[in-house]
Image: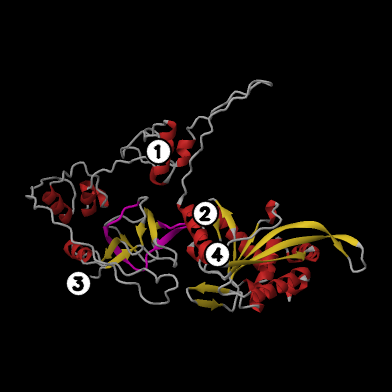
Amino acid sequence: MANIKPFCMPKWGIEMTEGTIAEWMVKEGEPFTKGQLLCLIETDKITNEVEAEYDAVLKRLLTPASEEALPVGALLAVFADADTPDAEIDAFIDGFKPAETSVAAKGGGSAPAPAATPAPAATPAPAREPKKIVTNRAISPEALKLAEAEGVDIEPIAGSGRNGRITYQDVVQAMRPERALSFKGTAQLVEDTAEAFASPLARRIAAQHGIALAGITGTGPRGRISKADVLALVKPTTAAVPSFGAPFELVANQPTVQPFDKVRKVVARRLTEAKQTIPHFYLRVSASVDALMDLRKTANLVLGTKASINDYLVKAVALALVKHPDVNVQVHGDAVHSFPHADVAIAVASPKGLVTPIVRQADRMHIAQIAATTRALIDKAQAGKLGYEDMDGGTFSVSNLGMFGIEAFDAIINPPQGAILAVGGVNRVAAEAANGDISFESRMQLSLSVDHRAIDGAAGAQFLQTLKGLLEAPEGLFA
């Protein structure tokens, strides 16, 4: 048999269950070379570029770009040599079985998941008398055979193959009935046809505000009308300001409904699972940071860097984790994974929601390297360009809200990590000196959230004691 290879929805990390084809860079029938960009696949938080691992031809494109999420392992396309007959491609697709991608149930160890119950065979449709089609259109033999068998009119079909050639998939798409969009709520969609290429959320907002989608120029991928395009046409309402002393009257207080996007859904699900399944306990301490802030000013001048207090915190946390490896852990089912180096995740607010890119082996970096790494990760997060490799893993997390004026808070553990440090702002407080005098010093509140299944209270307390010592005597950060 010819060299035929399937291209399936990849699985990037244990949490990934589905993905969406955002855009194909190679059309059906086109050859590609190793390293060439094939397509863009969107997951819950990131968009990954998929590059070819070998030279081949995209013989059959089964799943076009859309907003429909597909499960991991779903067959997306078929690659083969240029001279591979279509009949062999069809036979390969008919006999293809996706690989098992499910993971063991929580707490179930490494036992394999039970095999899925096979779906009942569909009742075959009554045979249709083939209708001979005579056309000057460029069409593949298999596409022509299918069109004749199913009685499909090929003239309205816009071929997606090379030079407008009608492919097998084009005929399959033409056979599918158009889906009428529905809207759950009091408003009705103003356009339920496919003439206006718009996202579901854009249609929903247009329906709420009575905006016609026809004629709007979309700014999204492939000219799709996005939420921003519709919101730009929403006219702001102006309410008259009542004069002083006028009778108070209630006005309509209707909410603006904003459905969760994919990122918010994942964050909500993960946080709920973490809070429900992980037995949290909390250890709190404050540290004097006057010496740290003085050293930071001097070190930044000497090193020619712009390291922030958070960069010094990452360094101190990493050194403390290496000294206390029983805190530098991940929890997987009934097993605890301990690591020799500290991969510290930092919580960053991005346009796609809360993300946690990782400073890998921060214990081996000096301050200037940590500052450059965190700056690059923050810039990528704010631009929405974080990749899977930027967020996969991590042995500990740091969440700092001090820059927003928050004095103290408790964070939720980011599984499978065993702990997370919540950092508050720096405040000037009164303190008693050794001679009994009262002075003022700068203190920072720290709260450690710990997974009690893997980390004991004494271990967490000893970690915080070491961390506090490094912050109050910061010369140890350069040792």
Say which label, 4 or 3, has the lower sequence index. Answer: 3
Tell me the SS state at disc 2. Answer: loop
Say which label, 3 or 2, has the lower sequence index. Answer: 3
Classify residue 89 as left or right of residue 194: left
Label 4 vs label 1, nearer the camera: 1
Say which label, 4 or 1, has the lower sequence index. Answer: 1
**Figure check: 125 above or below 279:** above
- Residue 388, visible in the rendered structure: yes
What amino acid type should be assigned to the residue bearing mark 1?
Gly
Work out how far the residue at label 4 is from the one at label 2, CA to CA, in angstroms.
Answer: 20 Å
Q: Which mark is residue 185?
A: 1
What amino acid type should be assigned to the residue bearing mark 3?
Met
- Residue 165, visible in the rendered structure: no
Tell me the SS state at disc 4. Answer: loop
Label 3 vs label 1, nearer the camera: 1
Label 4 vs label 3, nearer the camera: 4
Work out how far the residue at label 2 is from the one at label 1, CA to CA, in angstroms.
Answer: 32 Å
Circle 2 Cα neighbour tier, 10 Å, few/some/many (<14 / 14–19 / ≥20): some
Give the residues in magenta.
Answer: 41-65
82, 93: nearer the viewer: 93
